[in-house]
Image (spheres, rainbow, N blue to C red):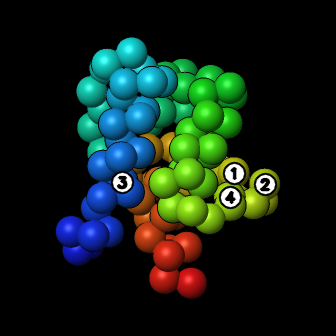
Amino acid sequence: MNQAGNEPIAEIRSFIEAKLLGGRAIAPDEDLLLSGLLDSLAVMSLVTEVERVTGRPVPPTDVLIDNFMSLEAIAAYVNGRSAA
């Protein structure tokens, strides 16, 4: 991933750590959903943040565990949508 591709992910990571987890750091592969770190309301806030950062809507059909379970999964989802 190039540096420009990392900027949205860094912003999303900061949002997760600061706003959703109260300052707790996360590893790129840490499970955010099945671990219980994020509840359904937090996931909706995360989806809204992904939309804000990328400037693209996230269709309801894309709000899947596979796309939002970790920072790595979010990066793959965001980068995949950017390439499309």
Identify which residue, 47 or 73, lies in the foreground.
Answer: 47
Check disc 4 and give the amino acid type.
Val
C-beta proximity under 8 Å, tags 4 and 1: yes
- The kind of secondary structure element at disc 3 is helix
Q: Which mark is residue 9?
A: 3
The residue that disc 4 covers is 58
- The kind of secondary structure element at disc 1 is loop
Identify which residue, 77 or 30, lies in the foreground.
Answer: 77
Q: Which mark is residue 42?
A: none
Residue 74: percent from left, percent from top: 47, 54
The residue that disc 1 covers is 63
The residue that disc 2 covers is 60
C-beta proximity under 8 Å, tags 1 and 3: no
Instruction: Tell me: residue 65, above or below residue 7.
Output: above
> What whole-number distance in Å separates the C-alpha atoms at marks 1 and 3?
17 Å
Identify which residue, 17 or 68, lies in the foreground.
Answer: 17
C-beta proximity under 8 Å, tags 2 and 4: yes
